[in-house]
Amino acid sequence: MATAPHTKKQPHKLVMHGHERVDNYYWLRDDSKQSSEVIAHLSAENAHCRQALAHTEALQECLFQEMVARQVKERQSVPFKHGAHFYWHEYAGDAEYPIYWRDASAQKQRALQILDANVCAKDHAYYDLAPIEVSEDGTYAAIAEDTNGDRLYQVSVKDIEDGSYLNDKLVDTSGELVWCNTGRCFYYVKMHQQTLLPFQVYRHRLGTTQDNDELLYEETDQRFWTQIAKSKDKASIVIYHGTKESSGVSLLSADDESASVVTLLPKEENHLCWLELVDDRAFILTNWQAKNFKVVTTSISTIADKSTWHEVVAHREDALLENFEVFNQHLVFSQRVKGLPQFIVKSLDSGQELQLKFNDSAFSAYFQDNLDLAAKRVRINYNSMTTPESVLEFELSSGEPTLLQQHQVAGEFNAQDYCCEHIEIGARDGQQVPVTLVYRKDKFNPSENPILIDGYGAYGFNVDADFSYSRLSLLDRGIVYAFCHVRGSAMLGRHWYEQGKMLNKQNTFNDFVDATQAIVALGFGAADKVLATGGSAGGLLIGATLNQAPELYLACAVHVPFVDVLTTMLDESLPLTCGEYDEWGNPNDKTYYDCILSYSPYDQIKRQAYPHLLVTSGLYDSQVQYFEPAKWVAKLREYKTDNNSLLFKCDMEVGHGGQSGRFNQYREVALEYAFYLDVLARAC
């Protein structure tokens, strides 16, 4: 067994509400990321992780090659029309990133290359390209790039026809760009240097420097983020102001290069809304007098007067309304019933509704490239745990589907070899927790298989049953995969979210523990072969669970885990803290302080045995700072009473999302899977 790094203890007192905490590893925080002592410590942790897993390198390479081999290397997206051209992207050979194209015809006979992202990424260890935004006349492409994972995008502008770049260069943007209809200027959102929230809307005129850009809106409430979008009728630039509980909407004319911001819906506490504008009408997804949301319509001129709102899709206690697309004669909305997604087409004339049919009961789907109000079909991206990513179009009049594309799995893959189940288990307080499972049929033996249990449980974010090329490497080795839709998600409606946040957060951890025990009792996995994983807020879930019920798990992998919740939420100088008060509570209030303290993984570490642990992070993570998992690992080493593995890998070149590139990202997954398989082999 490789020797773990020694982490020095340097007591740092933290006092609030008369309660004192001593953080011996606070010194690992270095906001500059330049401290030689901190870098040396992280490097030592990385070396220890490499040494401890050196005997699995051949297995890691085998897993990586399996994952890559399942990908069809030559792949194109389905073209969509914007203005006078069709746009698409394609992957070629071993390229990590796509090449973007356009043509006047969907047949792609005279394709013009817009951008080769591989060329842009070649000098960077990390690369992320935001959606390319093309001016309405098709002349220019605005390109936003993040090259270290901190989600601060640099913007450049390219002349599509001649391939030259303009001198325009912007920094510190959110990556969201919207063109004015004239094509001579565009709007963007700038990020706050401290909170890293998008907070300012600027207008940039081509041929000028960023210093001369016009500030049109600045958010002064640190709880709120700012987003921009263009309305579907292309007449307006819509500015959204939001927290996790409140929202407001402002507007700019997309035709007027000198337009000022006009308030459409004032910011309102405990009101969440999203809208689409069509001519003089607004269609609004709102939770006003509708906990699970409804869709209403009204004239834009009277939108602030809620008495003029007319219901289009009614609120339901048993269905969470999530999104919609509006067309000239139809509205298509997505909702969730008993945790499972549905898509409904509604005639705006007759009110008649038609539910679209999919092959799987549990699946993941979203609207894709529905830019034309006059379209007769709605396009939806669809996949499930046994069905690779597909693009379908449904006739709005009949619901008749057309499969435009389905990604292939190279090699020997047969969807019929796998089984996906969506079940409910009883939690300790009587609530029914949804769980989605998938396994390979010929490898399944009741109560004998290893099982990997995953979870998230925060922000009302729902994780649907999606397809994974990498997960097949576990399923084919007889490992069952289960995702627990614990409270904190909104899988069963808004109430499911509210029961797993703020003062109710303990429900999230109870659900995960109860689901783990029930899944094993039902025979989906062996009690001594239970693995668990989670990332970000899902890392908090696993961290808290391991303090409370470590005996249930053999090994866990946690990625960019939010584990020092109390210290972070007390520090307003850290990015995102103020914007998170609606999720965890503000610990400046003793009631919330005590609640967060009761489950914060770092604070609740005990002198007890913990499972084998693999922890990963990124030095440039702006969402969960690297020092949270670094401190957590150091304190776990001090307190744990077992001889199990405790490995920490901090990637020195990336942020919250980990490695980039369609193949390169599998290196991290292969490491995680090799860790599981190695622990299982040693446990037998």
Image (cartoon, rainbow, N blue to C red):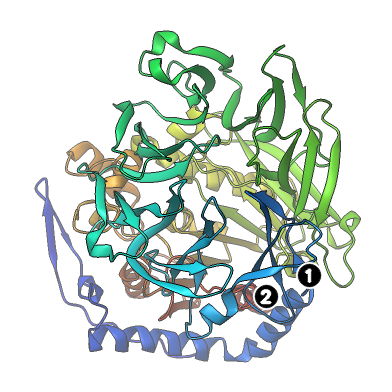
Q: Which residue is drawn at the image coordinates 75% and 65% (left, top)?
A: 76
Q: Which residue is drawn at the image coordinates 52% and 74% (left, top)?
A: 659
> Residue 567: x percent and y percent?
23, 57
Kindly give the residue lying farthest to the top in the view shown: 307
> Residue 63: x percent and y percent?
71, 79
Q: How far apart are the two marked residues, 2 and 1, measured between alpha carbons?
A: 9 Å
Q: Is residue 227 visible?
A: yes
The residue tagged 2 is: 677
What kind of residue is marked 2?
Leu
Q: Which residue is drawn at the image coordinates 71% and 27% (left, top)?
A: 344
* Occupied quadrant, residue 669: bottom right
> Residue 258: x percent and y percent?
30, 43
Q: Is residue 643 visible?
A: no
* Occupied quadrant, residue 210: bottom left
Is 355 placed left or right of 8 in the picture? right
What kind of residue is marked 1?
Arg
- In the image, residue 476 sits, relative to residue 347, either above or below, namely below
Proximity of marks 2 and 1: CB atoms separated by less than 8 Å: yes
Q: Which residue is drawn at the image coordinates 74% and 15% (left, top)?
A: 352
Q: Secondary structure at mark 2?
A: helix
Is 130 placed left or right of 470 in the picture? left
- In the image, residue 495 sits, relative to residue 388, either above or below, namely above
Identify which residue, 311 or 383, lies in the foreground.
Answer: 311
Is 459 placed left or right of 53 in the picture? left
The residue tagged 1 is: 477
